[in-house]
Amino acid sequence: MAVTILIPTALRAFTGRQSQAQADGKTVGEVLKAFADANPDVRQHLYDENGELRSFVNVYIGDVNIRNAGGLGGPIEDGDTLTLVPAIAGGVVCEPEQKP
Amino acid sequence: MLSLNAEAIAAIRAEGEKAYPDECCGFLCGDTDEKGGRRVEGILPVANASEREEKFHRFRIEPDDFLAASRAAGAAGLDIIGFYHSHPDHPAVPSEYDLQLALPCCSYVIVAVGKGMAEELTSWELSDDRSRFNQEL
């Protein structure tokens, strides 16, 4: 049994339109690497040029964001479900003097 | 390409007016066809998680809220196919900030709200090279 990875809509164009995938590993980082190895087009959206997880990519095991629980080095077990959750932000961002 | 029904448009416009002078934000729930066309079945409003003093020109969605919305949509057989937000007293055109933080393969609906009244509503999709938005509505 492997780890199940739930893929958000924004990344499915890079995973053959799969909404979920399976990968093996003993840590979150190993599972994500195996997932990226199997889906090379998704790599640039998960990792920056230094190989670090991009700041706008959040990874959950169940209901727990790994940034609050061991990060990429945290353990993961067969049968766990790992969810990729993008950070969403934007807006006008005008100068303060333009505030209504 | 995005298909957005009148009910969803009215709901987004109402959310923009309710949040004014702050930015509103939320999820577009629906499905995507084999050619990448997106059809909205409904919206899910969410709290703007930006700092209090930033809400008038920024929006931010907490990842916990995204996860909850994704599960709610999934329970209804739908996906999160995009996002909406308002531009208080500014045109319904994506900002450079919007572009920097945009995700591929999603629709970004923007409603302009002038002096508390919803005005133009547009929708945009990030280009493949991330250099610009292409207007789809």
Image (cartoon, coloured by chain):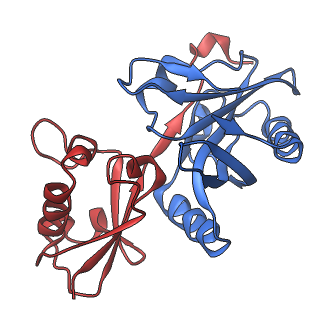
Q: Is residue B99 above or below residue B75?
A: above
| Residue B133 at x, y percent in the picture | 52, 21
- The reply, left or right, for residue A57 in relation to residue B40 is left
**Image quadrant where one finds the N terminus of chain A:** bottom left
- The reply, left or right, for residue B112 in relation to residue B54 is right
For chain A, the rendered hue is: red
Q: Is residue B40 above or below residue B102?
A: below
Quarter-of-image position of residue A19: bottom left
For chain B, the rendered hue is: blue
Residue at 26% x, 47% y is A42
Residue at 39% x, 78% y is A62
Of B49 and A28, which appears nearest the observer? A28
| Residue A73 at x, y percent in the picture | 12, 68
- Residue B47 visible within the image: no
| Residue B50 at x, y percent in the picture | 55, 41
Q: Is residue B94 above or below residue B70?
A: above
| Residue B129 at x, y percent in the picture | 35, 23
- The reply, left or right, for residue A63 in relation to residue B73 is left
Residue at 60% x, 42% y is B37
Quarter-of-image position of residue B25: top right
**Image quadrant where one finds the C terminus of chain A:** top right
